[in-house]
Amino acid sequence: LPSLKKAGDGRIILFAGIQALLGQGDRVHVSASKHGIVGLTKSLAVGLGEFGIRVNCISPGSIDTTRAPGDERPDRSKQIPLGRKGQLFEIAGMVRAIVGPAGAYLTGQTIHINGGLSNSGV
């Protein structure tokens, strides 16, 4: 932070996840931590705005990646309105937009990239 403050400009991107919205009975600890990241994003944005530092959060849904053995998750593709998992390049594209000129007036926001799952009532 000291170098970002000195520069008078910077971007910080935090990552939460779909559990910040949906919750899950057997993963209460995950939901609580994801909510905490959203709150941290908002607080940092308020506290660092005067230094020109913008803080945002990306909250991805199910992303098509390889998980460690034993850490597999249920396939929610049928519950996702777009009918598929997201791709890593779709998350990377949002990161690029936030850190580029288009993100110059964006701070304290949580951007949900989940194919509409957070709107489906699941």
Image (cartoon, grey):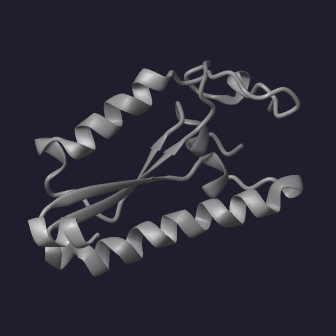
**Residue 24 image offset from top left, x and y in percent:** 80, 53
Q: Which sits in the foreground, 24 or 116?
A: 24
Q: Which quadrant would residue 101 be assigned to in this image?
A: top left
Place of residue 51 in the rendered image (x, y in percent of width and height, measured from the top left): 15, 74
Q: Which residue occupies 50% across, 64% down?
A: 38
Q: Quadrant of residue 71?
A: top right
Q: Residue furthest front?
A: 3
Q: Residue at x 12, y 71 (%)?
A: 6
Seen in the picture, residue 29 relative to 97 is either above or below; the reply is below
Query: Which residue lies at the image location 80% right of the left edge and 62% below the top edge?
Result: 28
Q: Where residue 44 sits in the image (x, y, percent)?
A: 36, 73
Q: Quadrant of the N terminus?
A: bottom left
Q: From the viewer's perspective, is residue 112 above or below residue 90?
A: below
Q: Is residue 99 visible in this depiction of the protein?
A: yes
Residue beneath the point at 59% across and 48% down = 17
Image quadrant occupied by the C terminus: top right
Between 88 and 80, the one nearer to me in the picture: 88
Query: Which sits in the foreground, 49 or 79?
Result: 49
Q: Position of residue 58 (x, y in %)?
A: 44, 48
Work out whether residue 8 can be spotted.
Answer: no
Q: How many marks?
A: 0
Q: Is residue 111 left or right of residue 80?
A: left
Specify the quadrant of the image occupied by residue 76.
Answer: top right
